[in-house]
Image (spheres, rainbow, N blue to C red):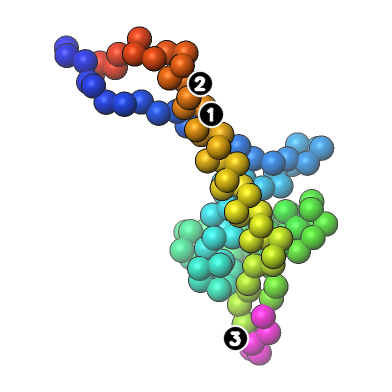
């Protein structure tokens, strides 16, 4: 078989844990916060992510408890709820996490290409 001449890339996943090994922040929390920011409510965010409201709420609450700080500001809207918006901390966490993830991916790709260079040939099977 002829080699496929497609570029390769590495994938890295990072997350933040507390001292007990509990997840504080990672890709899942990032997606949740982005969705809450976009849709303005936990319920709408959960639906967009195809997750249950309770699962989303549990992750947000766990992260808030582990940080000792709030990630969401609940808007009061009477009987219909009111939605949620991100705190400045949540906005900062999104930006910093995305920046670190991008940097790590670049370093990983550079190391991968440095170590393997052109020596890796992918064959289709």
Marks 2 and 1, Cα distance to the nearest angstrom? 6 Å
Label 2, secondary structure: give it. helix
* Disc number lying in front (3 or 1): 1
What's drawn in magenta, residue-wise?
75-80
Label 1, secondary structure: give it. helix
Q: List the residue tagged with mark 3.
A: 80
Give the mark nearer the N terminus: 2 vs 3.
3
> Residue 62: percent from the left, percent from the top?
73, 54
Identify the image quadrant of the C terminus: top left
Q: Are marks 2 and 1 in contact (CB under 8 Å)?
A: yes
Q: List the residue tagged with mark 2.
A: 111
Q: Single out the residue that lies furthest toward the left.
A: 1
Residue 117, can we see it?
A: yes
Q: Quadrant of residue 78?
A: bottom right
Q: Is residue 6 placed above or below 74 in the rendered structure?
A: above
Of residues 36 and 114, the one drawn nearer to the viewer in this rendering? 114
Q: Quadrant of residue 82?
A: bottom right
Q: List the residue tagged with mark 1.
A: 107
Marks 3 and 1, Cα distance to the nearest angstrom? 47 Å
């Amino acid at each position: 078989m002829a080699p496929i001449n497609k570029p390769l890339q590495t994938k890295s996943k990072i997350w933040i844990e507390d001292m007990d090994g509990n997840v504080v922040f990672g890709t899942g929390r990032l997606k949740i916060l982005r969705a809450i920011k976009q849709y303005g409510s936990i319920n709408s965010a959960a639906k967009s992510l195809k997750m249950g409201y309770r699962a989303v709420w549990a992750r947000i609450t766990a992260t808030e408890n582990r940080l000792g700080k709030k990630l969401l500001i609940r808007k009061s809207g009477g009987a219909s709820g009111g939605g949620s918006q991100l705190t400045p901390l949540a906005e900062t966490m999104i930006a910093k996490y995305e920046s670190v993830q991008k940097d790590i991916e670049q370093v990983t790709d550079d190391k991968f290409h440095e170590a393997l260079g052109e020596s890796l040939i992918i064959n289709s099977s």
